[in-house]
Amino acid sequence: MPARGQLNIGGEAAFELRKGGADSDPTVNQTPNDKWLVYASSLRLFINAPISDEWFVSGALQSDYYRGSRSDVLVSSLNINWMPNESLKITAGRFTTPFGRYDELLLSSKNPFVHLPLSHVWNMPVNQKRGYFFGNSSYEGTPGQSLVYRRLYSQGLKVSGTTSNEVLQYELAATLTGVSSYTDIGEQNRPAFIGRLELRPVIWNKIGLSFGRGPYLLDDPINNVLSDDKRADYLQNIVSAYTEFSYHYYQLTLQYTFNRWDSPWINETGQLIEEQIANDVEHYLAKFKVRFPFLVGGYGAVRYEHYIPKEIRLDSQNITGKPSPDKDRIEFVVGYQINRNLLLKTSYLLSRNDGTELQDDVFAVQLSARF
């Protein structure tokens, strides 16, 4: 632990050259538009301030293109931590959501790919104020939700640690809302619970399990047809499991995620059309990475995803169907670790969508710089 009174500051910036298809959109392929783009896609500043040998404050400021244009600088993380020993840490405040492989998704310098998976970016028609809604999701209109909140932070209380032999790592959190959403203040009379476990039975294998269960609807005049208790009864339930195998230059990861939002259907005038709808989604992911033996710091990687929204039934309309079509994504990447703080990646994201096919493939070159 650094000495008390010492302030540690660092950061990361991602610079990109990017060209997407005609249907490019932040919620479709993480691309602001279909033009040739040269921009800094994300910027983060990290601060760590020790208080004593066991206590420290940690925080992060960031700006990104979450909605397709440069966001204002926001406090994405700010927490106080008590670490009585090397195997236990208690965190209170705003912190990284302990779900899935966030360790390699939060920072571009840790992510071997340029894009986040569909579980973190594709918005389903489930809104924090109205529940299920008809029509397409958009930030300008009615925003939906991805399975995991894309900015990857939550607010609450977290306990994390590892067993003495470091075979098992764990993170358990009570937060203000479910994995798919975020709020700055308490909106419900009950917390959401999020957990992440990672087991390493042998040196070449990891097995991970993540789960989340909690309310996601926010108090708003449009849903005042619901009582506070009824609003809190609508839950997001999500579970994700993965296994990772490593051998010499090769790494293979397989992952499965199941998500359900229990939701009402409240129309744009505040009328309760349906009281209970189960919005289910399955997400399959496989990725393979190889480090080039002929080029130190070089690697190639491919990731395949299959995203399956399940059918829902709207009794009041006598309609059964999928709220969103199935999707397949394949991303090919060649990367090179120039030095400890610079990672260069060239990527092509190939997209396939059931129903109406979109022109949403993306070519991107990304330089991630730590400082």
Image: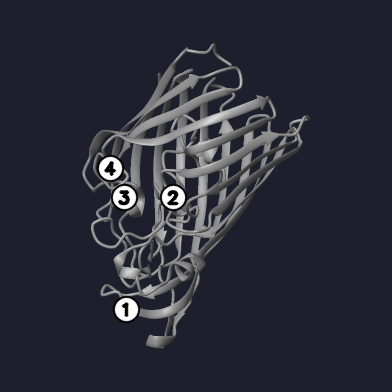
Q: Earlier in the sequence, mark 3 or mark 2?
A: 3
- Quarter of the rendering containing residue 269: bottom left
Residue under the image location 36 percent in, 75 percent down:
225
In 3D space, how far apart are the residues under numbered discs 3 and 4 (Cα atoms)?
13 Å
Disc 1 and disc 2: Cα gap in Å?
Answer: 27 Å
Left or right position of 97 against 20: right
Amino acid type for the residue under numbered disc 3: Pro
Of the image marks 2 and 4, the number of the one nearer the N terminus: 4
Q: Earlier in the sequence, mark 3 or mark 4?
A: 4
Q: Nearer the viewer, mark 3 or mark 1?
A: 1
- Upstream in sequence: badge 1 or badge 2: 2
Regarding mark 3 in the picture, which secondary structure is present there? helix
Q: Is residue 7 placed above or below 150 in the rendered structure? A: above
Q: Residue at x 43, y 29 (%)?
A: 59
Which of discs 4 and 1 lies nearer the camera? The answer is 1
Spatial separation of the CA atoms under disc 2 and disc 4: 25 Å
Q: Which mark is residue 271?
A: 1
Q: Nearer the viewer, residue 78 or 308?
A: 78
Residue that mark 4 sits on:
19
Contact (Cβ within 8 Å) of mark 3 with mark 2? no
Residue located 40% across and 34% down the image: 346
For residue 26, which numbered disc appears in the image? 3
SS of the residue under disc 1:
loop
Residue type at mark 2 is Tyr
In the picture provided, is 244 more to the left or to the right than 60? right
Disc with the residue nearer the chain's start (4 vs 1): 4
Q: Is residue 369 above or below residue 211?
A: above
User: Which disc number belongs to residue 149?
Assistant: 2
